[in-house]
C-alpha cells in the first residue's frame, strides 16, 4: 500500500484459472503404400502426443475400413470391423488383403489425446491409400501323366480343361500349348505351329488323341502348358505338366 497525499493504493490478489485444452496428437503415416496381391503390405503408422508436459494421455489407435476378408497383422478386431492398436503394435504393422484380391483399399486411421485434468480431448484422423498390385496365379491344369497305345493307332491324351485359380474376373486364360511332340506325330485336333508346338482351345481337349508315324514305336514325353494373365498389368503365371507316351510295338 502507498500514499502520495492524493490517492491510496491497495494490493489485491487475482486468481487466474487456466483451463486445460487438449492438443491434437501427432499422427505420422504415409498417405500411400503399395504391395503385391496375396502378400503382406506394410502400413507405416506412428503417433506421439503434441503436449509433452505430462498432462495428456493418448488413446489407442483405431483403424477403420479394413475389408472383411483382409486382416491387419496386429491389434484387436472389433465387432464393427475396425481395429484397435496400442502404440507398440504399430511397429511393423502390415495388411494382408483378401485372397486373390487386387482391389485398392483406403484405410482411416484415428487417435485421440485427452487432458487428464478435465477430460478435454482432441482427435486427428488421416487416410492411407493401399495400392494392391495384381499378381497372376498359376492356373489349374490336370493331366493323366501316362498315355499308352499300340503302334499305328490313335492314343488318347487325357487333359482336363484348365481353370483360373483367381475367380474375380481380373485374369484371362490362354490357349493350351503342347511342346516336344515329334515331327512324325499328329494330334487329332488343334493348330500345329511353325516351331512344332500345337495350340488347342479348351473345347478341343475333348477326345484328344495323337497318332504316331507309321511303324514308329519310339516313346516320348510331351509338355502341356497354359498361362493366366492379369488384364490390368499383363502379369502372367504359367502351369506346365508332362505326359509320358508309351507306344507299344505291334
Image (cartoon, helix red, strand yellow):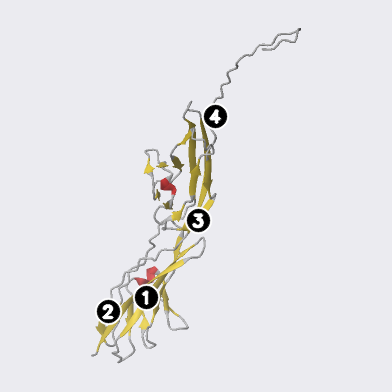
Residue 51's disc number: none
For the C terminus, the image quarter is: bottom left
User: Which is more foreground, mark 3 or mark 2?
Assistant: 3
Residue 147 in picture, x, y percent from top left: 27, 79
**Secondary structure type for disc 2:** strand
Give whichever of 180, 158 is nearer the camera. Answer: 180
Residue that appears at 27% across and 86% down: 247
Q: Earlier in the sequence, mark 2 or mark 4?
A: 4
Q: Which residue is mark 2?
A: 147
Q: CA distance from mark 3 to mark 2?
A: 46 Å
Circle nearer the viewer, 1 or 2: 1
Distance between the Cα atoms at labels 2 and 4? 81 Å
Q: Position of residue 83 (x, y in %)?
A: 41, 42
Query: Do the numbered discs 3 and 2 sit on residues whose CB atoms are within 8 Å?
Result: no
Q: Which of the two discs, 4 and 3, labels the residue nearer the N terminus? A: 4
Q: Does the rendering let one see residue 67?
A: no
Q: Nearer the viewer, residue 8 or 120?
A: 8
Residue 12 vs 120, above or below: the answer is above
> 10 Å neighbourhood of mark 4: few (<14), some, or many (≥20)?
some
* Above or below, comparing residue 195 to residue 133 in the picture: below
| Residues at marks 3 and 1, CA–CA distance in whole angstroms | 35 Å
Label 1 CA crowd tier, 10 Å (few <14, some 14–19, many 20+): many
Earlier in the chain: of badge 1 and badge 4, it is: 4
Query: Which of marks 2 and 1 precedes in the sequence?
Result: 2
Q: Secondary structure at mark 3?
A: strand
Q: Nearer the viewer, residue 99 or 17?
A: 17
Among numbered discs 3 and 2, the one appearing first in the sequence? 3
Q: Which residue in the protein does label 1 denote?
A: 224
In the rendered image, which residue does mark 3 sit on? Answer: 34
Give the label, 3 or 1, closer to the camera. Answer: 3
Secondary structure found at label 4: loop
Q: Which residue is mark 4?
A: 21
Amino acid at each position: 500500500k502507498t500514499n502520495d497525499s492524493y490517492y491510496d493504493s491497495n494490493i489485491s490478489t487475482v486468481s487466474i484459472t487456466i483451463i486445460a485444452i487438449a492438443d491434437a496428437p501427432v499422427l505420422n503415416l504415409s498417405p500411400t503404400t503399395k504391395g503385391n496381391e496375396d502378400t503382406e503390405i506394410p502400413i507405416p503408422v506412428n503417433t506421439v502426443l503434441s503436449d509433452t508436459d505430462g498432462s495428456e494421455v493418448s488413446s489407442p489407435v483405431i483403424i477403420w475400413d479394413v475389408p472383411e476378408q483382409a486382416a491387419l497383422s496386429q491389434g484387436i478386431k472389433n465387432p464393427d470391423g475396425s481395429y484397435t492398436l496400442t502404440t507398440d503394435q504399430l511397429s511393423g504393422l502390415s495388411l494382408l488383403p483378401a485372397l486373390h484380391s487386387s482391389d485398392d483399399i483406403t484405410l482411416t486411421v484415428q487417435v485421440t489425446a485427452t487432458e487428464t485434468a478435465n477430460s478435454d480431448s482432441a482427435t486427428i484422423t488421416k487416410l492411407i491409400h493401399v495400392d494392391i498390385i495384381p499378381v497372376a496365379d498359376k492356373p489349374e491344369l490336370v493331366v493323366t501323366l501316362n498315355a499308352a497305345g499300340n503302334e499305328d493307332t490313335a492314343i488318347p491324351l487325357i487333359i482336363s480343361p484348365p481353370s483360373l485359380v483367381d475367380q474375380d474376373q481380373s485374369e484371362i486364360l490362354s490357349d493350351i500349348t503342347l511342346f516336344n511332340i515329334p515331327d512324325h506325330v499328329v494330334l487329332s485336333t488343334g493348330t500345329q505351329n511353325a516351331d512344332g508346338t500345337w495350340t488347342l482351345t479348351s473345347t478341343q481337349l475333348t477326345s484328344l488323341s495323337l497318332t504316331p508315324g507309321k511303324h514308329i514305336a519310339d516313346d516320348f514325353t510331351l509338355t502341356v502348358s497354359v498361362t493366366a494373365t492379369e488384364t490390368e498389368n499383363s502379369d502372367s503365371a504359367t502351369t506346365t505338366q508332362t505326359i509320358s507316351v508309351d507306344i507299344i510295338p505291334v
